[in-house]
Amino acid sequence: MVDGKGLVNLGDLSKPATVLIEKISGAIGILYEPTRVKRDAFAKAEAGKIHALANIEISEIKQRALNRLIHEEGKKQENIESIIAQATASVQEGASPENIEDDWISHFFDKCRNVSDKEMQGLWSNLLAGEANKPGSYSKRTIELISTLDKSDAHLFTRLCSFVLTGGQFILAVLNCNADIYKKQGINFETLTHLDSLGLIKFNNLAGFVLQNLPKKLTLSYYGTLILFTLQSESNNDLEVGSVLLTQVGQQLAPICGSSMNPELLTFMFDHYRSKGIKAELFLPNK
């Protein structure tokens, strides 16, 4: 930063967030210093550069290359610090960022340093905070895949995750990709095939996917709303869940992609399963 100031005031952070910054600093270099020390160091560095440049002669093209390099590295540092600043706000009190692997941190910042879009920085910061809260939650493969996502791909995946149920794992309820409820969100054969090619989902529009060996009653959650499925047999039931499954990377990204519930899904889903002879209803514990 040209003013010699960082984007995070260490005095305002919780202990786990401070530990995260210290961990990052140890893995990829010092990012934050007390303001006075950093300002003094910055002034000395500027004086040193001026003195050094006064004693050498370089061509105009090399000067332009040097200026470009300084500008590019400055932007990368701004991106890194912005992502860290956002992540620290989501680090939980019980987090253990000291257990994040140094190689993971190096790989993470190698891939995110060119990300200047604020929305995409939000996704990266969620990933960093999630890893700090529970080290080992996100693989390097997930980092690699996020680094290849266009903003439009990220938005599409977020819209798809508005159809996610939870029950030990994230389950996509794409029960008929030709239905209007999905088309209104841009979810169709073409876009699902695209997300499959990216490695976020598995799409099988012919056979579909099923949950197997289920008891007669199964409870799943949809953004905090509990849904009770009453299946046909006392045990060993199957429940078809549509044509889409999240991959391992998709499972890791689903909870941090910023999705929200679709108010039409419950009615659509209840009607769909009723036509299959399966009862699906809101779970009322005191009923």
Image (tube, rainbow, N blue to C red):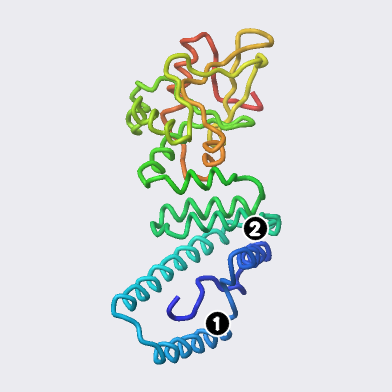
Mark 1 or mark 2: name the one nearer the start of the chain.
Answer: 1
Secondary structure of the residue carrying tag 2 is helix
* Residue type (three-letter) at the residue carrying disc 2: Asp
The residue drawn where x is 70% and y is 59% is 98
Where is mark 2, residue-wise? 102
Q: CA distance from mark 1 to mark 2?
A: 24 Å
Label number found at residue 168: none
Towards the viewer: 150 or 63: 63
Residue 186 image-quadrant placement? top left
* Residue type (three-letter) at the residue carrying disc 1: Lys
Relative to 172, say whether 36 is above or below: below
Where is mark 1, residue-wise? 38
Secondary structure of the residue carrying tag 1 is helix
- Viewport quadrant of the N terminus: bottom left
Q: Nearer the viewer, mark 1 or mark 2?
A: 2
Residue 151 at x, y percent in the picture? 37, 47
The residue drawn where x is 42% and y is 32% is 197
**Label 2: few (<14), some or many (≥20) within 10 Å?**
some
Residue 69 at x, y percent in the picture? 39, 71
Towards the viewer: 142 or 119: 142
Residue 127 at x, y percent in the picture? 55, 50
Residue 105 at x, y percent in the picture? 59, 57
- Viewport quadrant of the C terminus: top right
